[in-house]
Image: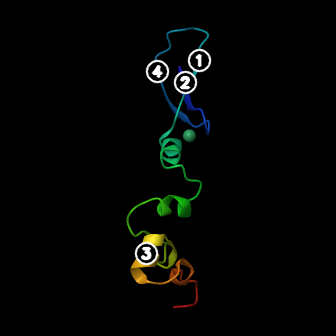
Amino acid sequence: MKIVCAWCQKEIGSTPSHLENERISHGLCDDCRIKMEYNFTSLEDFIEKLNAPIMIMDKEGLVQGANQSVSIMLQTSKEAIKIKKGEM
Ligand SMILES: [Zn+2]
């Protein structure tokens, strides 16, 4: 029996089938489970719910976002923390 995520339809795995006519079962994949647990819709939304200062960096190490904890710690706005290409 194939098990697919009820939300995103991603295949999670399979179990030995017991019933001939029941080939698909539904579950919840890890990504969707985390989304539901923390009830967030974007990465920015997710880090905002964490109780630690979190910064998002791109592959070049430039800060692309930060949560409110960072903003409070650095005593500046979240917008001011972001570093755009060419500013360094
Ligand atoms: Zn899913």
**How many angstroms separate mark 3 from mark 4 (CA)?**
45 Å
Badge 2 density bin: few <14, some 14–19, many ≥20, Cα 10 Å: some
Residue bearing the label numbered 3: 70
N-term mark: 1 or 4: 4
Q: Residue at x 49, y 63 (%)?
A: 48
N-term mark: 2 or 1: 2
Q: Residue at x 56, y 30 (%)?
A: 4
Q: Amino acid at mark 2?
A: Lys
Give coordinates of residue 82: x percent, y percent: 54, 80
Query: Relative to the observer, which residue lies in front, 4 or 72?
Result: 72
Disc 2 element: strand
Q: Residue at x 51, y 45 (%)?
A: 31
Residue bearing the label numbered 1: 23
Mark 3 C-beta closer than 8 Å to ligand 1: no
**How many angstroms separate mark 1 from mark 3 (CA)?**
48 Å
Residue bearing the label numbered 2: 2
Give the image quadrant in which the ligand numbered 1 is located: top right
Disc 3 element: helix
Disc 1 element: loop
Asked if 14 appears above or below 19 in the picture, the reply is: below
Badge 4 density bin: few <14, some 14–19, many ≥20, Cα 10 Å: few
Q: Amino acid at mark 3?
A: Val
Residue bearing the label numbered 4: 15
Q: Amino acid at mark 4?
A: Thr
- Callout 2–callout 1 Cβ contact below 8 Å: yes
**How many angstroms separate mark 2 from mark 3 (CA)?**
43 Å
